[in-house]
Amino acid sequence: MKVLALPGRDEAGKFRAVVRDYPGIWQGLVLDVGCRSGGLKGALAEQQARYCGLDLRQPADVIGDVERGLPFRDRMFDTVVALDVLEHTDRIFDAIGELYRVSRRHVLVSLPNVYEVKLRLRFLFGRRLSGKYGLPLRQPRDRHRWLFSLWEARKFLQIQGQRHAFEIAEEGCLIGPRRGFAGGRFLAGMLPNLMAPWYVALFQRKEAG
């Protein structure tokens, strides 16, 4: 499995990593689903892509909800990206179907691995996994709805891709910069379900040339 090491610990590091490690997909019209503040757009500054960011609120280019249907026609975008988005949705099957529906060529998805070693240790010692899980005292603005391993994420995406005429072109795991040394990369490649915080998969439409 391909191991991608983030160049920085902040969110922008993940955007730079996927742009760097998947160089062949940043052409034409790119849709960034769950774009937040548009960090991927900055990482694409030197690419030939035309960017459109969608999220539930501003400053997105388009306001929309992926699990309730994207406001775009079929196959409108060359590449559709959803980085750490699907786990926030209640209707995850509807949401991923929308990603495939509006893509003409590629879909790039990342999902968190809650079975990663640091989170296992937090759970073992009775600490919260993160602010996205647990039972908060006040209703949160957002949270993760699903808890799964890297292998579960891989199987889920593989099956959903097949149902929508997509196949995995490349797959890998994302690790932070502290594990980016040679030994850390080796361990993540050998034991991704234990050592990799994220799974990432690049899909291509089967009939795309």
Image: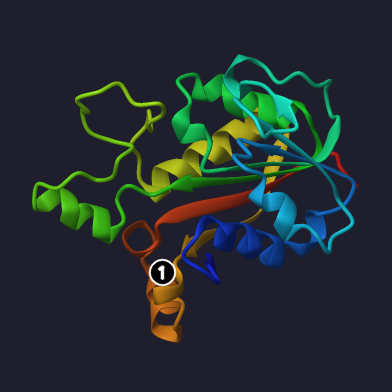
Pinpoint residue 54: horizontal percent, then vertical percent: 69, 31
Residue wearing tag 1 = 188
Image quadrant assignment for residue 62: top right
Pinpoint residue 85: horizontal percent, then vertical percent: 53, 37
Image quadrant assignment for residue 160: top right
Q: Is residue 21 left or right of residue 71?
A: left
Q: Residue at x 38, y 33 (%)?
A: 144
Q: Residue at x 40, y 26 (%)?
A: 141
Number of marks present in the image shown:
1
Examine the rendered structure and indicate whether residue 206 appears above or below residue 191: above
Q: Colour scheme of this structure image? A: rainbow
Pinpoint residue 9: horizontal percent, then vertical percent: 46, 65
Q: Amino acid at mark 1?
A: Ala
Farthest left residue in view: 125
Residue 164 visible to an observer of this rendering: no
Pinpoint residue 93: horizontal percent, then vertical percent: 54, 23
Instruction: Name the foreground residue: 148 vs 29.
Output: 29
Examine the rendered structure and indicate whether residue 2 appears above or below residue 136: below
Q: Secondary structure at mark 1?
A: helix
Farthest bottom residue in view: 182
Examine the rendered structure and indicate whether residue 190 appears above or below residue 154: below
Q: Residue at x 73, y 50 (%)?
A: 41
Label 1 Cα neighbours within 10 Å, binned few <14 / some 14-19 / many ≥20? many
Residue 20 visible to an observer of this rendering: yes
Q: Is residue 60 left or right of residue 89?
A: right
Farthest top residue in view: 68
Q: Is residue 58 left or right of residue 30?
A: left
Q: Is residue 7 left or right of residue 79?
A: left
Instruction: Name the foreground residue: 149 vs 136.
Output: 136
